[in-house]
């Protein structure tokens, strides 16, 4: 296993699905310690943002749930009906241990997103889409799968924002009609590293 102190430094250099999965499998055991140590603030910001719009009894799918830090933040914001999925079995094992998810499953990044346990009032992708994790095609897949009158809460960190395709894609979705961007706020991601993120809440009409 590699030195856990180095995982964050390497997370933004992953180029293939296999490399991403191997990387997170290797990181799973030390992920929480390393990112909590860096002040990981995005999950709480996302959870509080979507709580402004969705009711506490909303059914949520936490995609790329990892070890469940995003689920923990959603729970702290008042939500209790949370399903989770992730492409990395080792990360998912951490989420399982938290005992806060209704259903948890291993997802296939090359297959359509499984929303069969829904309909979901909220889909979350917290710290999931961008350089070093899920590609922009995953953003499109979630947007396509949103139920009517549902919300998508997600984040793009500074590394991802530096690549203009991510926000350009979001603008195209909003401009195409049928979706409103209710919330966008720039704020802390890893404050100990002076790294920020944008948090968004998209609503499908
Ligand atoms: C930075 S972690 C975020 C985990 C959790 N949401 C959190 O906030 O702690 C990114 C997660 O996205 C998952 N992931 C990477 N590529 C993915 C993909 N194509 N589809 C779904 N999840 C993916 C990884 O396995 C990893 O658990």
Image (spheres, helix red, strand yellow):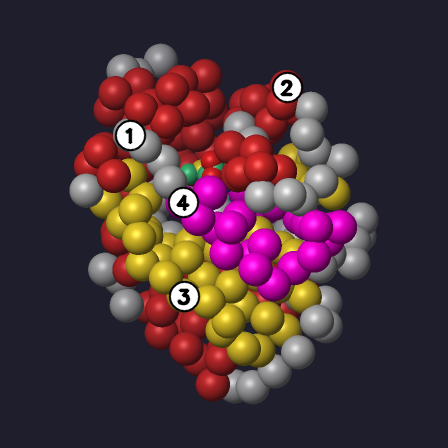
Residue at image point 70% right, 50% down: 56
**Magenta residue check for 48:** yes
**Which residue does the numbered mark 3 point to in the structure image?**
184
Where in the figure is residue 15, as x and y percent of width and height? 34, 45
Which comes sooner in the sequence, label 4 or label 3? 4
Q: Secondary structure at mark 2?
A: helix
Is the residue marked by circle 1 packed among few (<14), some (14-19), or many (20+) residues within 10 Å? Answer: some
The reply to whether the C-beta atoms of the residues labelled 1 and 3 are less than 8 Å apart is no
The reply to whether the C-beta atoms of the residues labelled 1 and 4 are less than 8 Å apart is no
Which image quadrant is residue 31 in?
A: top left
Pick the quarter of the image with the N terminus.
top left
**Which residue does the numbered mark 2 point to in the structure image?**
97
Q: Is residue 101 left or right of residue 182?
A: right
C-alpha distance separating marks 1 and 2: 22 Å
Q: Identify the mark at residue 38; answer none if there is no mark.
A: 1
Q: Secondary structure at mark 4?
A: helix
C-alpha distance separating marks 1 and 4: 12 Å
C-alpha distance separating marks 2 and 3: 32 Å
């Amino acid at each position: 296993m590699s030195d856990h102190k180095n995982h964050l430094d390497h997370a933004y250099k992953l180029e293939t699905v296999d490399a991403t999965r191997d990387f997170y499998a290797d990181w799973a055991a030390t992920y929480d310690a390393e990112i909590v140590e860096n002040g990981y603030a995005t999950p709480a910001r996302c959870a509080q943002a979507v709580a402004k719009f969705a009711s506490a009894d909303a059914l949520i799918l936490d995609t790329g749930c990892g070890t469940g830090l995003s689920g923990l933040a959603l729970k702290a914001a008042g939500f209790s009906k949370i399903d989770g999925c992730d492409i990395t079995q080792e990360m998912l094992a951490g989420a399982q241990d938290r005992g806060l998810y209704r259903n948890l499953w291993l997802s296939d990044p090359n297959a359509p997103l499984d929303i069969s346990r829904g309909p979901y009032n909220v889909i979350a992708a917290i710290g999931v889409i961008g350089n070093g994790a899920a590609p922009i095609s995953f953003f499109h897949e979630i947007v396509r799968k949103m139920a009517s009158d549902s919300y998508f809460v997600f984040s793009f960190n500074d590394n991802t924002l530096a690549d203009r395709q991510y926000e350009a894609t979001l603008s195209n979705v909003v401009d195409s009609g049928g979706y409103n961007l209710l919330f966008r706020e720039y704020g802390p991601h890893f404050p100990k590293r002076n790294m920020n993120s944008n948090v968004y809440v998209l609503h499908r009409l």
